[in-house]
Amino acid sequence: MTDLAVLAVGLGVLPLAAILLYSLGGFVLAHREGIWGFLAGVLAFLSLGHAMAAVLVNKSLFGDTSIAIAVAFVGLLAGAGIAWSLVEGSFIRTEPNRILWVAVAFLALHSFGDGLVLGRDFVGGVVPSVQADSLTVSATVVHRFLEGCLVVVPAIWATWKARPAFALLLVSFASVLGAYIPGAVFNAYGGSLRSLVQVAIPTFLAAIEATLGLLLLVRGFLPIAAADRGSRWPWWTALGFIAISLVHFFVE
């Protein structure tokens, strides 16, 4: 499984490049409406579009509607609970740090989910069905870089130095762990139970990601983008949503 290891580590490394934004820290702070608005669109797609679509699509794969609804419902509640505890809980004192830590949690969860998708292509076949042409690779690089920006921009806003912000980005290596889960499930279970677990894990995590991203969006990114009472942030949000949608057209 050397090829899987290389690809999984590659997925984990790519978001680290977002630390380069620290060389443009003044620009990031001076153009809050455009940058936060654009990233709000990216976050809206990743959480409400991509993650929630995965939950709905996977529903038909369970074979039992009640189990599918239960898994999705518990996941949605878990994501909302995690976000609420980080944003409104008492153990993180300042508003910028609260938004930053929710963004870190979102990156970790989304990275794990990316790893699950990658690992699934290495299960059950003689030759892995991973597409690796230049267009797909370029789109993946852009995709993962923007995910890193979801952490770096809040870190700059929260006045974190580059070194600790870089350490936060290391959660993107959750993709390495996620890449080996499908194979482990395939080897550990058999028959209908294996099929159920293979669908339940990504569905549950996607449901958590959906509500975690939703609260990060409405509690953090959108209010910050609109804080200067400008009129252009909705356009930037739409642009971010469209841009990450196009990226996914080439990745998936």
Image (cartoon, grey):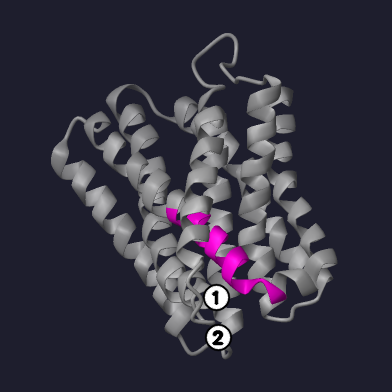
Residues 96 and 225: in front is 225
Residue type marked 2 = Glu
Looking at the image, the residue that sits furthest to the front is 231
Residue 232 in the image: state x and y as whole percent. Answer: 51, 67
Note whether residue 118 is visible: yes
Residue 61, position in %: x, y? 27, 29
- Residue 183 lies, in percent from the top left, at 53, 28
Q: Is residue 252 left or right of residue 96?
A: left
- Image position, residue 9 (x, y; %): 73, 39
State if disc 2 and disc 1 touch (CB < 8 Å). Answer: yes
Establish if 24 lies above or below 1: below
**SS under mark 1:** helix
Q: Quadrant of residue 159?
A: bottom right
- What span is in magenta? 30-44
Q: Which residue is mark 1?
A: 99
Q: Per the image, is 116 magenta?
A: no
Q: Which mark is residue 23?
A: none
**Residue placed under numbered mark 2 in the picture:** 95
Picture quadrant where residue 63 is located: top left
Q: How many residues crowd mark 2 within 10 Å: few (<14), some (14–19), many (20+)? A: few
Position of residue 198 relative to residue 40, above or below, is above
Name the residue furthest top. Answer: 126
